[in-house]
Image: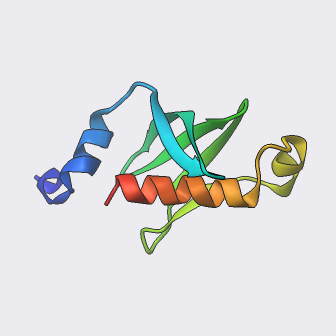
Amino acid sequence: MYLLSIPIVCLHLLVMEEQFELPVAFNKQELHFPAKLLNYGYSYKLEVDIEGTKVLFEPDEERNWRALTTPEEINTNKKITVDLLKAIVSSIEDILK
């Protein structure tokens, strides 16, 4: 009954269990990252594989997306930058509008 109030795009994501490619515009290129939706009760997270490092993205209380990572993970994989994480968040937000 409560699912009817969820936007159609989110409803589609709630039943998705397979991996998909997340397109991201970054440095004048379109990159594609393997991603997976993970359900956590009434919430969900996206797991994005960035060059072998899995980074979780989740919506916060204001429905803005954030990356769950540590400075150590960013320092370990030099291809992961704050700007890339911001571009991924922007792509997620564009898809879910």
Name the quadrant of the C terminus: bottom left
67 displayed left or right of 35: right
Numbered-mark total:
0
Whether residue 2 is situated above or below residue 56 in the rendered picture: below
Q: Position of residue 3 (x, y in %)?
A: 17, 51
In-front residue for pair 10/87: 87
* Foreground residue among 29 and 38: 29
Which residue is most to the bottom?
62
Q: Quadrant of residue 87?
A: bottom right
Res. 42 in view: yes
Position in image of residue 35 (x %, y %): 52, 35
Q: Residue furthest top?
A: 18
- Identity of the residue drawn at 48% across and 39% down: 22
Above or below, 30 relative to 97: above
Q: Is residue 30 left or right of residue 44?
A: right
Image coloring type: rainbow
Residue projecting furthest to the front? 28
Of residue 84 and residue 72, the one placed in the foreground of this image is 84
Q: Is residue 68 visible?
A: no
The spot of residue 18 in percent (x, y) is: 40, 24
Q: Residue at x 49, y 47 (%)?
A: 45
Up the image or down, 54 lies above or below 65; here it is above
How far from the left and from the top, in percent, is residue 2?
A: 16, 56
Name which quarter of the figure residue 67 lies in: bottom right
